[in-house]
Image: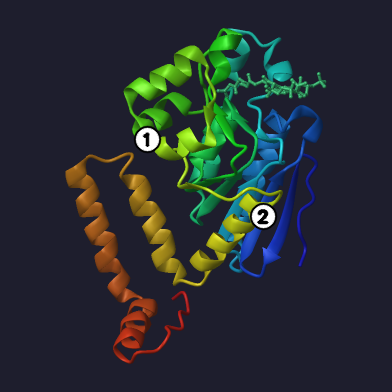
Amino acid sequence: KRLMSYNCILVARPEPNVALITLNRPKALNALSSPLFTELNQAFLELDADDEVRAIVLTGSEKAFAAGADIKEMQPKEYSDVFKNRYLEDWTLLTKTRKPIIAAVSGYALGGGCELALMCDIVLASPTAKFGQPEINLGVIPGGGGSQRLANIIGKSRTMEMVLTGRNVSAQEAEKWGIVSRVVGEGEGQVVKEAIDMAKVIASKGQIAVQAGKEVVNAAYELNLAEGLRFERRLFHGLFATKDQKEGMAAFTEKRKPEFTHS
Ligand code: CAA
């Protein structure tokens, strides 16, 4: 199968139905340059369109998931450049991906790196992970959604502390605060391994339900409660039109494993 080739990322298929994207600018600690983000968006578009892919793991290196937007690229920019060129506006494209994205974070997830992890659906952290929004040290503020997504997840006081002091948060603290779903055991590659295992579990389910599940949970961050409950119920109702609902419930009644056809 033809895989696109990229310069700043690597795309692999560690399991038949699981894709792995690795940020690959090791010399710059995976700083998120514009070319890198363009490739990342393209990779997510392609994987979303590929029927064989059911879940996507996104990772960096042991030392850095990503150390933020590329400061050397930003340094010469003027207000008129960033305004006219809608700088960072395209970062939200990957959040349109229907398939679940699991971030496997080791080392630094700072600034845009932290924001990229927050754009994923599930975040697993290695004990070495460090999350932070250090933009304040550069005379700016988060621009990739950090202030908004963190406030939704960890609340006002903790978000203010991160954004206004620039302090990094350890993996353990990030777990306690709910930035990550769990911290995995120590060891090189462990967080990627566990993310792939989790992706395999997701890939074994009925994919229409999986994608509906992702959509409703994300809606909780955009809609008010009444709208969100109505949206959830309607998607739930809609799943009764799928073969996977017939199969899943028949299998339960017949005490056997379901064989989902994703239809
Ligand atoms: N942009 C560009 N280059 C970066 C980078 C970044 N965000 N982070 C690291 N690098 C580069 C360094 O410049 C260095 O390159 P050279 O060898 O050419 O000098 C290389 O990566 C290795 O980095 P260090 O030598 O600094 O490594 P270290 O281990 O001493 O420190 C670090 C690691 C604490 C993460 C440090 O690199 C650092 O503070 N990086 C910047 C973190 C940051 O401020 N991120 C926020 C960026 S702003 C942003 O993201 C805006 C937004 O909201 C979207």
State which quadrant residue 85 falls in: top right
Q: Which amino acid does label 1 sit on?
A: Ile
Helix, strand or loop at label 1? It is helix
* Residue matched to label 2: 20
Work out whether 112 lies above or below 78. Answer: below
Question: Picture coordinates of residue 177 (x, y %)?
Answer: 40, 35
Distance between mark 1 and mark 2 Cα atoms = 25 Å
Q: In this view, does 257 lie to the left or right of 31?
A: left
On whether ligand 1 comes within 8 Å of the CB at mark 2, the answer is no
* Residue matched to label 1: 153
Question: Picture coordinates of residue 112 (x, y %)?
Answer: 58, 28
Q: Residue at 64%, 40% (x, y): give it.
A: 106
Q: In this view, does 149 lie to the left or right of 188?
A: left
Question: Picture coordinates of residue 89 (x, y %)?
Answer: 54, 29
Q: What residue type is labelled 2?
A: Leu
- The one nearer the camera, 104 or 80, is 104
State which quadrant residue 37 falls in: top right
Work out whether 145 lies above or below 237. Answer: above
* CA neighbours of label 2 inside 10 A, class few (<14), some (14 to 19), many (20+): many
Tell me if label 1 and label 2 are in contact, CB under 8 Å. Answer: no
Q: Which of marks 1 and 2 is nearer the N terminus?
A: 2
State which quadrant residue 114 falls in: top right
Q: Residue at 62%, 50% (x, y): give it.
A: 191
Quarter placement of the N terminus: bottom right
Q: Residue 18 carries which label?
A: none
Residue 200 visible, this orientation: yes
* CA neighbours of label 1 inside 10 A, class few (<14), some (14 to 19), many (20+): some
